[in-house]
Image (cartoon, rainbow, N blue to C red):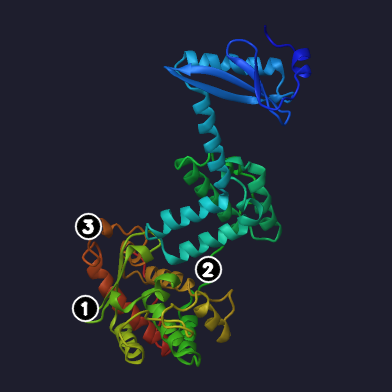
Amino acid sequence: MPLTETRLRALKVKDKSYKVADQRGLYVEVTPAGSKLWRFRYRVGKIEKKLSIGSYPEVSLKQARDATYEARQAVASGGDPALEKRKRKIREEFLTAQTFATVAREYIEQFMVQNGRAEATIIKANYFLDQLAPAIGNRPINDIEPFEVLAPLKRLEATGKHETAKKCRSFAGRVFRYGVATTRCKADPTSMLKGALVTPRATHYAAILEPRELGGLLRAIDDYTGYIVTKFALQIAPHVFVRPGELRHAEWHEFDLIDGVWKIPAGKMKARRPHAVPLSKQVVGYLTDLAELLGYEGYVFPSARSSKRPMSENTLNAAFRRMGFSKEEVTAHGLRATASTLLNESGLWNPDAIERALSHGDSNAVRGIYHRGKHWDERVRMAQWWSDHLDELRAGGKVIKARFG
């Protein structure tokens, strides 16, 4: 006869486990320890199986019968409720182990490192993870809600780090989307945070845009008395106007001093495309002198502490401060703006050639050729003219006036 709540409460403990049937395959198993466990017996084909539903009284008689009804429906539809329960448990255990930090480190290693992202980009990604880890690093990525991500971002905002907060949100979004793609989470909670952060005001790298002031900077560089490798980097940087990270990660095997070209591989470029820099006679001279000191192996501008590492990203700016230039006057990255502005104002060069020299929109990688793309010949002439012009400014000579049209 079917069970009742009264019968269930009256069931006594025995030396061995025993079963008391209810109906439609449902029964309760009473253990020697006193537990009353709900079980549902069913068949899949010729195989008899059983599904654990819970224990009484945590699961009432009615709840056990409702669960049995749902399980019977699943069996009638060709399913296997015990197997599905086991799969859900395995997935829950798997997802619990998949914390935000675990997935983020996997994303950095497998998606960024193995895809050849620039070292500076990977360092920044790890920095963003460090900012987020105290709040959500150990949380299962599938359980994280928008407010949990917003909290550390707002703390960054409170310290005035608006740009960092924005970039941390962007990084977290990429990790969550990677988690969705690899079935570790169902959605990207950061998509709900758009508009929740203060939009940082655009800032520009400080740059010298007056020719006579540029001449003063060049003379100050020549008088620099710090680490000799830093001095060479300072002397070369205004001539080639690459990004500071591209300069400090330069390696000797990338240079052809005979043909006068520096071939930067895609992995070191911001746009992930290879780029070529024509070298003027002055730059070749600097590099030749530097090679006599260091040899032609490894980094062109190694760290003062280890030849196996490039110079620090702060080295050039620190040198400018040592020379007496404030961060509002000049930065290493600002040398690109200096070159772009003065080359455009000269009116001598095609603006597209200048943009290509700055590696803006460089599509030459599609052809797989570094130095035979559009505007190359003009860029070679422009590189030599620019170096000659810098020499004149250093010597306090003539200033090229803007010529338009």
Name the mark nearer the viewer: 1 or 2. Answer: 1
Q: Is residue 305 above or below residue 66?
A: below
The residue that appears at 36% across and 59% down in the rendered structure is 272
Q: Given the image, on which type of amino acid does mark 1 rest?
A: Asp
> Who comes first in sequence, dot 1 or dot 2?
2
Which sits earlier in the primary sequence, circle 1 or circle 3? 1
Name the outermost residue toward the top.
1
Residue 201 seen by the camera:
no
Vertical comparison of 389 with 141: above or below: below
Instruction: Name which quarter of the figure residue 231 lies in.
Output: bottom left
Q: Secondary structure at mark 1?
A: loop
Q: Is residue 382 left or right of residue 119?
A: left
Q: Which residue is mark 2?
A: 205
Q: Who is closer to the viewer here, 15 or 18?
A: 15
Measuring 49% from the left and 41% from the top, which residue is drawn there?
Answer: 180
Q: Which residue carries the number 3 mark?
A: 367
In the drawing, what numbered circle is on residue 259? 1
| Position in image of residue 98 (x %, y %) | 54, 47
Q: Is residue 316 left or right of residue 8?
A: left
Q: Residues within 10 Å of mark 3 (few under 14, many from 20)?
A: few
User: Is 75 rendered above or below residue 304?
Assistant: above
